[in-house]
């Protein structure tokens, strides 16, 4: 579990050396070790429990020793990961601990009980040791679910660890370690709440009383309080909706009094200069941040889990059964001030931070499980080594992203959200600055807010919400993506509106980040198109098999308007201002060299084909038979699209088979190909008429396209050359 580092000593067994094995692969290597430990623990739980406890005792050394060397700390962290894995394998349910024989259960219980008593008796005071101590305790969360008698002792110990660390407002030196350690202990409450489930319910009052006491004494910072409240919400979620409502009322009532005050909204949110005044009041500025993030956590942690596969069905069911989300009654006062907070577009938020640059360049690793996320580190005062501008930038982004996520989470409530607030106010707040947003901001907006709003909007509100939301997004994104992709494909460099600040290093880094931002936004836009084609949002669309190729009489076809309430894609096609940029993006994406974006847009193309076949709308039929068909064939010339070539051939088959008798466009597209001859097309028609097998029809289409383009469709040619059994020899096996 260890790797060689400056802190390591030669006496420790090390199986990984970054100088030899590379820096980026250690996490994958350690994951495989943990998988191996998990397998052994599930098969031999008694042996695994005994061995991990023995390992912990070895690396911990003298329990009375108040400080540890860096190499000892590394070893203790490795052992903690092993403990978490072993406990998870034994108690998480997949190994069916209930069926374990009595003798084995007794030994396992005795082993972990002994370890727990050791942990409860420790008196470590160093912040680094207290963090490890907290992680050891929360690693036993699943054990506590089966043996709840010791939960009270663990809760008391966590509060003891929390209060043993001093509260500091300085961000210099050791005091920062104490602040981070305190946050980690609060995070341990969250992890134990999640793992121990109902075992914590009898102790909720004690926890609440302790929180209130510490807050009254000034011994609990706002960020720490919010972490503990999140743990409280997780506990309440295991006891039913009524308990959640009571807990939410208790937690949100104090926030309601300050959040809804008109004075601060008028002073700080009426115009951009008001935000500048707020930034001068650091304490109030961070209190707003923590309020927004807590609303986000409250929505995330409350309610019941819902399936995301059929959003419309989920909304209908919850409405019909009278289910009311415990946060529903609070949205009406939470959302208005939040929307006002999101309208400002501040230049300070545009410049990219060093951490964002590193993330785009792939130079950062994911935080270790249990480590406080960067957003949790946005504390109430300026962080060490950071300018005031950086702290304002962090605040703006933190509030913006949490605000977007809060709106997206609220949208999953269905009618409870969409009918509690004026749609125009939400759309104005989200879309007001779309034209000047940088790519990474646009992507966050769509990912966190737009996609859920589209996904969960009731059909009768599509005109108010979906049409008005998507039009500015599609219009701007089509223009921005077209410009940036043209620049990348013609000049070799994507031109994006994002500001990289003072980037040290080569120009190559800027080019890499620009292309990454372009691809990320492209994929997110295509994700919106993917949502538009979800089956649950297009339940009124008949399958092509139901329509049948013999159904050729236009008088039997339906109008596009008849699908407006049962197909979101059909509804979109009736709104020309929204449909045109969406269709442009759809055809252009096939010329962009991004197979992931193509994968996401394929279902939307399928829905368009269905509509073109099922309706009498000539313009749509012409678009599908000509523009879309040509673009898909062009997409097959991009080698990267080999991974989705089968799906693209399937779309070509559907267009030709179901539309060529209604419109001349599909045949004209094929005849326009460089090597296509009239007799080849006639022979192709003859082959199609002799088989009803979709698989054989796709094979005929594939063969025809290769013939008609002189084998120049790289996506098909690439598939042909690699689809041979001998390609296993090209795998990089490395040295053993």
Image: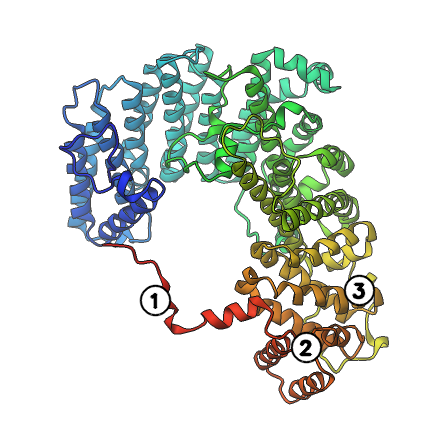
Q: Which residue is mark 2?
A: 675
Between 271 and 198, the one nearer to me in the picture: 271
The answer for how far apart the CA atoms under marks 3 and 1 are is 48 Å
The answer for how far apart the CA atoms under marks 2 and 3 are is 28 Å
Between 536 and 658, the one nearer to me in the picture: 658
- Does residue 163 sit above or below 609 in this rendering? above
The answer for how far apart the CA atoms under marks 1 and 2 are is 35 Å
Q: Which residue is mark 1?
A: 729
Total marks shown come to 3
Q: Which residue is mark 3?
A: 620
What x and y, as percent, mark residue 313?
A: 63, 56
The residue most toward the right is 555
- Does residue 414 sit above or below 593 in this rendering? above
Disc 3 vs disc 1: Cβ atoms closer than 8 Å? no
For numbered disc 2, what is the local secondary structure? loop
Which image quadrant: the N terminus?
A: top left
Residue at 74% over, 56% down: 583
What x and y, as percent, mark residue 16?
A: 24, 41
Please report whichever mark, 3 or 1, sits nearer to the chain's N-terminal start.
3
For numbered disc 3, what is the local secondary structure? helix
Please report whichever mark, 2 or 3, sits nearer to the chain's N-terminal start.
3
Between 257 and 13, the one nearer to me in the picture: 13
């Amino acid at each position: 579990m260890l790797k060689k580092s400056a802190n390591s000593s030669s006496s420790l067994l090390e199986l990984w050396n970054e100088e030899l094995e590379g820096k980026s692969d250690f996490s994958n290597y350690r994951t495989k070790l943990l998988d191996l430990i998990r397998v052994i623990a599930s098969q031999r739980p008694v042996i695994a429990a005994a061995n991990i406890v023995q390992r912990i005792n070895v690396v911990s050394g003298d329990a009375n020793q108040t400080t540890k060397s860096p190499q000892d700390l590394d070893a203790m962290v490795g052992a903690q990961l092993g403990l978490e894995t072993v406990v998870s394998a034994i108690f998480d349910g997949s190994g069916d601990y209930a069926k374990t024989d009595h003798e084995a259960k007794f030994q396992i219980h005795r082993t972990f009980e002994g370890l727990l008593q050791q942990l409860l008796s420790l008196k470590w005071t160093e912040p680094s040791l207290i963090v490890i101590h907290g992680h050891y305790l929360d690693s036993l969360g699943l054990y506590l679910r089966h043996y709840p008698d010791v939960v009270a002792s663990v809760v008391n110990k966590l509060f003891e660890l929390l209060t043993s660390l001093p509260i500091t407002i300085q961000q210099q030196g050791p005091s920062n370690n104490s602040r981070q350690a305190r946050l980690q202990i609060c995070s341990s409450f969250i992890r134990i709440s999640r793992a121990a489930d109902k075992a914590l319910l009898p102790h909720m009052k004690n926890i609440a009383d302790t929180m209130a006491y510490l807050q009254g004494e000034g011994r609990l910072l706002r960020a720490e309080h919010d972490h503990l409240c999140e743990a409280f919400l997780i506990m309440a979620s295991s006891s039913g909706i009524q308990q959640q409502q009571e807990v939410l009322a208790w937690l949100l009532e104090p926030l309601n009094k300050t959040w809804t005050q008109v004075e601060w909204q008028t002073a700080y949110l009426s115009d951009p200069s008001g935000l500048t005044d707020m930034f001068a009041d650091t304490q109030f500025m961070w209190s707003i941040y923590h309020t927004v993030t807590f609303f986000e956590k409250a929505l995330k942690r409350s309610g019941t889990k819902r399936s995301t596969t059929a959003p419309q069905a989920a909304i209908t069911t919850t409405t019909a059964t009278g289910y009311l989300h415990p946060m529903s009654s609070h949205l009406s006062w939470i959302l208005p001030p939040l929307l006002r907070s999101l309208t400002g577009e501040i230049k300070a938020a545009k410049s990219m931070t060093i951490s964002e640059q590193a993330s785009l360049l792939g130079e950062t690793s994911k935080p270790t499980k249990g480590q406080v996320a960067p957003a949790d580190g946005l504390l109430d005062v300026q962080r060490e080594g950071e300018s005031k501008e950086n702290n304002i930038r962090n605040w703006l982004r933190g509030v913006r992203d949490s605000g977007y996520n809060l709106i997206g989470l609220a949208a999953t409530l269905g009618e409870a959200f969409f009918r509690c607030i004026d749609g125009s106010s939400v759309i104005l707040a989200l879309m007001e600055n779309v034209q000047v947003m940088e790519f990474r901001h646009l992507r966050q907006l769509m990912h966190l807010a737009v996609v859920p709003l589209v996904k969960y909007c009731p059909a009768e509100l599509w005109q108010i919400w979906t049409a008005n939301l998507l039009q500015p997004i599609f219009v701007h994104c089509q223009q921005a993506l077209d410009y940036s992709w043209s620049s990348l494909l013609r000049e070799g460099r994507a031109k994006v509106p994002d500001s990289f600040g003072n980037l040290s290093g080569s120009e190559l880094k800027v080019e890499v980040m620009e292309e990454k931002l372009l691809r990320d936004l492209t994929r997110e836009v295509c994700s919106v198109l993917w949502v538009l084609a979800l089956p649950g949002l297009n339940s009124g669309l008949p399958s092509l098999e139901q329509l049948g190729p013999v159904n050729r009489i236009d008088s039997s076809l339906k109008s596009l308007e008849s699908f407006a309430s049962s197909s979101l894609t059909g509804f979109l096609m009736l709104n020309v201002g929204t449909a045109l940029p969406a269709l442009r993006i759809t055809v252009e994406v096939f010329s962009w060299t991004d197979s992931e974006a193509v994968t996401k847009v394929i279902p939307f193309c399928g829905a368009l084909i269905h509509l073109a076949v099922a309706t009498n709308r000539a313009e749509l039929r012409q678009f599908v038979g000509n523009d879309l068909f040509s673009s898909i064939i062009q997409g097959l010339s991009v080698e990267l699209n080999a991974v989705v070539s089968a799906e693209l051939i399937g779309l070509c088959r559907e267009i030709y088979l179901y539309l060529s008798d209604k419109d001349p466009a599909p045949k004209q597209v094929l005849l326009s190909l460089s090597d296509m001859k009239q007799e080849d097309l006639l022979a192709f028609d003859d082959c199609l008429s002799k088989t009803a097998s979709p698989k054989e029809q796709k094979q005929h289409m594939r063969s025809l396209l290769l013939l008609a383009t002189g084998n120049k469709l790289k996506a098909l040619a690439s598939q042909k050359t690699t689809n041979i059994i001998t390609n296993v020899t090209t795998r990089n096996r490395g040295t053993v």
